[in-house]
Structure formats: structure tokens, C-alpha cells
Amino acid sequence: MSEAFYDRPQFRPCGDRALLAEYGTGIDLAVNRKVYAVAAALRQRSLAGIEAVIPAYCNLAVLFDPIAVSFESLTAALTALESEMEAAESAEPRTVDIPVCYGGRFGPDLAFVAEHHRMTVEEVVRIHSRTLYPIYAVGFAPGFCYLGGLDPRLHTPRLPTPRTRVPAGSVGIAEAQTGVYPSDSPGGWRLIGRTPLSLFNPSRTDPFLYQAGDRIRFVPVAEPDFHRLRAAEEP
Amino acid sequence: MSDVFRVLSPGPLTTVQDAGRTAFQHMGVPVSGALDRYGLQVANWLVGNDGGCAVLEATLVGPRLEVLAEADMALTGAASALTINGLPAPGWTSQRVRPGDIVDTGVPENGCRSYLAVGGGIDVPPVMGSRATYLGGRLGGVEGRALTAGDVLRRGPARLLDRPRRLPWFPLYGGEVILRAVVGPQDRYFRSALATFFDSPFTVSAQANRMGYRLEGPALVREADAPASIVSEPIVAGNVQVPADGKPIILLNEQTLGGYAKIATVISSDLFKVAQAKPGDTVRFVAVTVDQAGAIAHQWATFLGDIQTLLAAGG
């Protein structure tokens, strides 16, 4: 067991319609996987009165209808759930491949990142695409993943001045984090490539390609493949 | 389904809102929706809709609309300045309007947000299960944005009311707002500041919008051993977060995760009072336990159920 785990979960009230169940502290993969196992188990069982489950790094919010279920009975249900769910905990996380065209106009900062670390752009791409990045949390913006696991050799400072517009799909690095912009937005990350996939498309039946708890793998693709995959995304 | 309103002037921030987009919070999609759920539901019940149908939410100055189809409409929330064809009309009451009528929701004397419902509901394409406008994500509502002059709004299928409906009272907003709150989730970081939080009046600052309400007042000082920020965790409407400067912010419906500690959380049935508070209004917090909060939720649900029954009978 990781030291980041609490001996027993802490249940904290969050007003009259939410409960925060916390399983440990900090940014810890084992604690995070526990959070996702509980979230998945809650979704599977669809307990009466639960309206939504929002997981994060070390805790999850259970939104409930106080007319249907009380805070007290919900904490009891969560405690009971934990003892039932050993199997779910050992389940391997799903790996989601995200094709990325590195460099060129899709990754205007790739050369900077390489120079900053005194390596070639090929090395940067090899290191960046070799890692399985766990999704610790999804938030900040629809589909935005807080990924762990960036190789320390690629930690790179942000742009001194953020760009006013970063195109959707851009893959970037900021300090110890890497990630993808699901929508057009301003941003100060160093852009090293772009995925042709629409990470967030509200008109799709499933607007998202992954969920927190999955792992992301960036798969390098050449520019012609980028355009082919991009064309397939456009309806 | 038909065109029902043309927007002549939109007001500074008028958006289509409903009961919110709840199904994708785990993917970073905030709830959005009407900030004043009391105003939302009563407006809808007054025109014979389900309580969660899409309405217009206006901020401070309401829109001026030309009516394009015969319809029942009702204005709730900050509803004191409504005129139809220049004549004052009461809020919290259904109004039959006809093509060519000019509806002006005006500048209310009290309160901050008005809710305009129309029989059949405002019909914009649902996005991920809701018609609510999420301005930050540019989705829902009318092209993900606030209304602009010239927009034409449609309504869903509607049957006109057999007789008018009215709420026999209406709330007055403004002045001092009392908000009941449950301590936590990070009250342990604010052990000595809790007394200040519950004993002091705060003032709504100019930074008050759909994201949240920043308050002015005595700084809420963290315990010496408490961290300045926390690992990002889920946010719910009503969370009172305390950033490093100690000035509390009541968070509303536009974000799902955040990294500041929360001293307390306003109970859901008091959030409409936040929605109706304006910069300069006084806010006081009153502590309730989780059990008391649960009991209040039951009372509030009963109260709303009674209103619904009353209005279905005409009010």
C-alpha cells in the first residue's frame, strides 16, 4: 500500500447535495486508481439518489438528492462498496492511443524543447511517445486531462507570453506536465505536435475518447496520415 | 414549434438556461444552467411547462423582445420592471402575449437576474442533454453565446393556458442576504477563521458573475500548518473557496475542479439568493449541520411541490 493512502476514507460534507470521499493525499497513482475504482463501482451499481460522480486526484464528489438518500446512509453505502470491489481494483487501466503529428506547423515549439534539453527533435519525440501517461483527472475545460508521468528529461518552462489561440488537438509541455488542448483556447504550453482526433465533440454520442483512470499513449504519425485521420473526423 | 421572440435589445448578459448539464461533470463539463433555480421553476410552472425547461436568464438589465407568436410567458426572479407595450405588467404571473407585442423586462428595482419562460420552453438544440448556455465552452443555448439583437428564438410545442396563473406572493431581493452553509470540506484549515466567517458581514464585490461571487470583508486566515493550495478536487455550486488573500468566493455552476481550500458550502436551497445578490449587497453566513441541511432540503422540496400544485390550479 502506498503511504499516501489514509487508513480509512475520509467522508466530508460538501453542502446538502454532495459528499467528498477522500482516499489519500497528494498526487499518487495508487490512490488515484482507488478513486477511479470507487467511481466505476458507483456508476455500475447506480445507487438510489446518486445524481453524479466527479472523481479527481485523491477524492471524488458524490452528488446526491438529499430527498432520496442521507449523507449518513451514503457514507455507509460507500464503505460497504469498498469491501465488495477488490476485483475492480486489480483491473488494468485501458490504454487509449492518440495519434500525434510532431513538429512542423503542428508543433512550433518542438525545436525549442529539443534545444532546451540539448537533444534532437527525434529524441524528444521518442521519449514523449514512449510513455503511458495516466489520466489523473479530467477538468478545467471539457475533456482536458491532467496527465502524470512526463519524463523529467522533457520538463520545459512555459512560454513567457501565452498564445492567444492554441488550436484544438495541440499537444504541449508545461513544466512537469504534458497534455492536449481538447478545444481552441489561449494557452502558454510549449506546443510539440497536434492530434488529428477530435478529443471533444459534443455532437458525438460519446463526446469524449477516454475517461479519467485510462492511460494515454501518443503515437507519432506523418503529416499525410494526420490529414487522412483528420478528414475521417470531419462528418 | 414556431418562432416566438425576436430580440430587439439583449441586455448586457442574457442567455438561454435550463436545469443544467449534469451528465458530464466527470469530463470537465460544468453544470451551467439557471443560477436561480427557484425563479427557473416557478417561471416554467406559471406557463404550464416542466420546471426544468429552457428559459431566458437576464442579468441586471433585461432584454426587449418583439413577440412573433401568441404565447403565455412569465417573468420571475428580479421581475419588478416588466412592461408589455409600455404598460407595467406584474412579474410572477402568466401573461398572454400576441404577435407584435413588445415585451421589455427593464431594469429591476431589486434582485439581479430575471427569468423569462414561455409556454413550450425556449427551443434551441440540446447539447449533451441540456439547452443551457456554457459561455466558457461556447456550447449550448444560442450558438454557445449570449443573445444579441436580431436573434430569433423558437419555442417547443405548447398549449395555451385555460386561465392565467399567478403566484399569490413574490420575493423581494436586496439588502442583507442570509446564507445557510455547512462547514467544509476543508474547514480544518480554517479552525480559527470559522468564527470570523460566521460572525462577520461580507459585501458582494464587483467581481460577481456566473462563475462565482467574490466577497469583501475580513480576511479569512488559514491555520499556519495549512497548505496555500490543495490538489485539484471536485467543485460543487455553493462551495466557498478561500484563495491566498483570504477573501472568500462563492462558487457557482461554471467549473468542475479547483485547487483552493473551501471553508464551507452554501446549501442548495439558498443558492437562488446568491443569484439575486448584487454588488454592494451584504451577505451573512449561518452555520447548519449536515442533518439540518438535509431537513431544510426536505422542507424546500415540499415548499416547491406546494407551489407547483398551487400554480397548476391557477394560483
Image: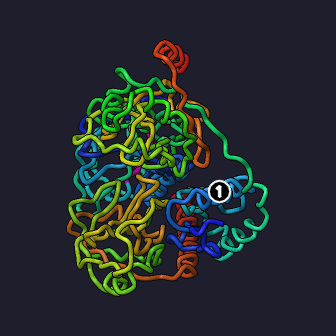
Relative to A101, B283 lies left or right: left
The residue labelled by disc 1 is: A39
- The answer to which image quadrant residue B279 occupies is bottom left
Label 1 element class: helix
Q: Is residue A227 above or below residue A60?
A: above
Relative image position of residue B110 (x, y in whole percent): 26, 64
Q: Which chain contains the residue that carries disc 1? A: A
- The answer to which image quadrant residue B196 occupies is bottom left
Q: Is residue B143 above or below residue B111?
A: above
**Residue drawn 28% across and 39% down?**
B102
Along the line of sight, which residue is nearer the eye, B101 or A196? A196
Relative image position of residue A28 (x, y in whole percent): 55, 59
**Residue drawn 42% across and 58% down?**
B258
Relative image position of residue B263 (x, y in whole percent): 40, 75
Along the line of sight, which residue is nearer the eye, B200 or B55? B200
Q: Is residue B73 above or below residue A129?
A: below
Q: Is residue B78 above or below residue B222?
A: above
Q: Residue furthest front?
A: A118
- The answer to which image quadrant residue A97 occupies is top right
Relative to B112, B179 lies left or right: right
**Residue drawn 66% across and 41% down?**
A94
| Residue B4 visible | no
Q: Is residue A4 magenta?
A: no
Name the magenta segment's main secondary structure. Answer: strand
Relative image position of residue B296 (x, y in whole percent): 53, 76
- How packed is label 1: few (under 14 Cα within 10 Å), some, or many (20 or more)? many
Amino acid type at mark 1: Ala
Q: Is residue B72 magenta?
A: yes
Q: Which residues are magenta?
A: B71-75
**Residue drawn 44% across and 78% down?**
B187
